[in-house]
Image (spheres, rainbow, N blue to C red):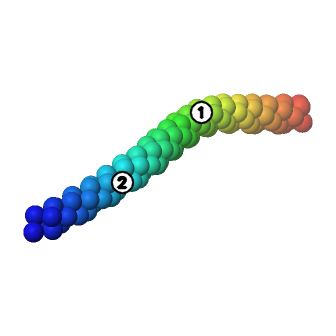
Amino acid sequence: ENSALRDKVSSLEKQLHAEKEALLSGRKQVATAKAALEGRLAAQQAEVQRTREAAEAIKNEAAREKSEAAKQMDMTKAELAKVQTELEAAKREVKQERSTSEASAAESLAA
């Protein structure tokens, strides 16, 4: 009977040892998978960060270009206003010269 019990205990110890080995192997697989997932997560987080930085750079460049375009537009408006003022002055001058010429012509005809 002792022999049978010893055999049973030995069998159970072998089974326990096999299960411990299987559990250890499973833990190693889980650790390996976890490390791989953490690596992929880190790579994805780095890609997200690069994308954010690129988007921020694009946004900043667009804002700079918009600001530059607004400055150019203001300069163009100022130049246009100056040209319009000069044109109005030239029109008044031509009108004045025409009036003066017409008055001189009328005086010449009257004399």
Q: In this view, does 43 lie above or below 108?
A: below
Label 1 SS: helix
Q: Which amino acid does label 1 sit on?
A: Glu
Q: Is residue 3 above or below residue 68?
A: below
Would residue 46 appear left or right of 84 to someone viewing this image? left
Label 2 SS: helix
Q: Which of 22 and 61 is in front in this view?
A: 22
> Is mark 1 in CB contact (under 8 Å) with mark 2?
no
Q: In this view, does 8 lie above or below 89?
A: below
> Residue 6, percent across and down?
15, 61
Q: Which amino acid does label 2 sit on?
A: Ser
> Residue 27, percent across and down?
32, 52
The residue under the point 57% across, 36% down is: 61
The N terminus lies in quadrant: bottom left
Q: Can residue 40 be seen in this view?
A: yes
Instruction: Please report whichever mark, 1 or 2, sits nearer to the chain's N-terminal start.
Output: 2
The residue under the point 70% across, 33% down is: 83
Residue bearing the label numbered 2: 25
Q: Is residue 59 visible?
A: no
The residue under the point 36% across, 54% down is: 25
Q: In which quarter of the image is residue 105?
A: top right
Q: How crowded is mark 2: few (under 14 residues within 10 Å), some or many (20 or more)?
A: few
Q: How many labels does the image show?
A: 2
Would residue 15 appear left or right of 43 to someone viewing this image? left
Closer mark to the observer between disc 1 and disc 2: 2
The C terminus lies in quadrant: top right
Residue bearing the label numbered 1: 68
